[in-house]
Image (spheres, rainbow, N blue to C red):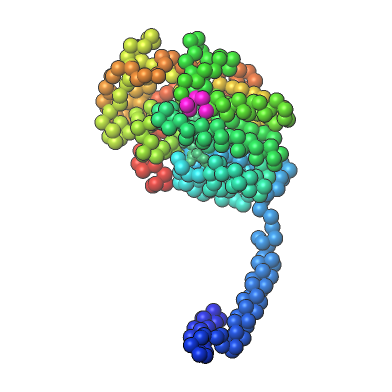
Amino acid sequence: MLNFVRSRSQQRSTRSMSLGGMDYPDPKKKGSFVGKILLAAVLTALCILVLKRSSSFNAPSPFSHHEPGVTHVLVTGGAGYIGSHASFRLLKDQYRVTIVDNLSRGNLGAVKVLQKLFPETGRLQFIYADLGDPKAVNKIFSENSFDAVMHFAAVAYVGESTLDPLKYYHNITSNTLVVLEAMAAHGVKTLIYSSTCATYGEPEKMPITETTVQVPINPYGKAKKMAEDIILDFSKNSDMAVMILRYFNVIGSDPEGRLGEAPRPELREHGRISGACFDAARGIIPGLKVKGTDYDTPDGTCIRDYIDVTDLVDAHVKALEKAAPKKVGIYNVGTGKGRSVKEFVEACKKATGMEIKVDYLPRRPGDYAKVYSDPSKIARELNWAARYTNLTQSLQIAWRWQKSHRDGYGTA
Ligand SMILES: NC(=O)c1ccc[n+]([C@@H]2O[C@H](COP(=O)([O-])OP(=O)(O)OC[C@H]3O[C@@H](n4cnc5c(N)ncnc54)[C@H](O)[C@@H]3O)[C@@H](O)[C@H]2O)c1
């Protein structure tokens, strides 16, 4: 039928009458034009009729309305390292999940893994969008009915933040404002916010408690602190439930090997110690550079608190379960145990079974000697405690995924 319409129009389109050097439309052609419009109108009406009869046209998206007994969570940054693990845990626990991500740093491969694991209608949807676009964000909130938001999306490298601070203030502080405004406008009452120990800066006293004064020393920490302040100011005059989780150093991956940490190769130079360790074990980089051996610590290298990603997402689920109108909770999420960089390197060698070359260099400006948490508040109030306190075990699991995904999710 289409072929027929096309060939007739091709024949007639060449026809026109020329009078006194001017072109006039052929009245017959005009008739055929009207006919075509009529035909198009009839076909469109037919299509609408057929679509309307099919059940999927009439059925509203399960994501667009609240369903009794189902909690629908918007996971921003769900294609990223922590967000994908959190989405997985939520889906396993029967939550309905919408991931919003602009894929600037995350991996569509991670979303595909989740879609394969949870293919049923109404479990998981992925929306490609940038949180810096308030119109797009508002549209997402008006087309979906969320019960809660877990806001992970961010740029998250301390080193990069000192080189490009505006990117950090925009992506973290300003985008959090956009998300919060959309939540307020659309009556979404629960926010679980990803914050960081970088908001504390360099406290003199360890361990860090939630009342330790926050004096961040780099744009990443400052941007997160400002975002926290905006959320807390808003919460004073609202019935929104707010849980702010300040993570320490996140490592590890899904013990079943379905998800992992796959930062973009171009971010390697800003990367975290676990990424550097695996890159060294795989021979992508010649070895590890440990900066600073004369700190006031037992072995002279810096001390950090490494928290396994599965424990971290468990803290999020507990925070979500305990969230209540007007309740504001701020929690450190760490193991409470400080590990030195030397200990980390030894654990990494053991976990990977590789001999890793280590160069010991002078201190890097801006690094602080010891950072570790006091996680007793979250243990008390949310009944949460880290299960993975063995560095080698977490690194072994992450290494298995790294080995079988040499190109990150590219080979997933
Ligand atoms: N990884 C850690 O050790 C650590 C420690 C403390 C806090 N955090 C916080 O945890 C959160 C997640 O970190 P991660 O390690 O999973 O990082 P990640 O880079 O793996 O994930 C961030 C995700 O957010 C997405 N994103 C970034 N900007 C966006 C935008 N404007 N719109 C939509 N999506 C956007 C990225 O594409 C990516 O998928 C961040 O807020 C980070 O600050 C991480």
Along the line of sight, the residue nearer the viewer: 361 or 133: 133
Q: With respect to residue 98, does 324 lie above or below?
A: above
Q: Residue furthest front?
A: 20
Along the line of sight, the residue nearer the viewer: 351 or 289: 289
Q: Position of residue 346 (x, y in %)?
A: 34, 21
Q: Position of residue 355 (x, y in %)?
A: 27, 27
Is any atom of residue 407 visible in this view? yes
Residue drawn 32% across and 21% down? Answer: 290
Check if residue 210 falls in the magenta segment.
Answer: no
Residue drawn 63% across and 29% down? Answer: 231
Q: Position of residue 18 (x, y in %)?
A: 50, 89
Q: With respect to residue 87, does 374 lie above or below?
A: above
Is any atom of residue 315 visible in this view? no
Along the line of sight, the residue nearer the viewer: 300 or 11: 11
Q: Which of the 4 image quadrants contains residue 398?
A: top left
Q: Main secondary structure of the magenta part?
A: helix
Magenta residues span 219-223
Along the line of sight, the residue nearer the viewer: 178 or 292: 178
Left of 387 or right of it: where is 271? left
Q: Position of residue 199 (x, y in %)?
A: 52, 22
Left of 297 or right of it: where is 56? right
Q: With respect to residue 28, does 192 lie above or below?
A: above
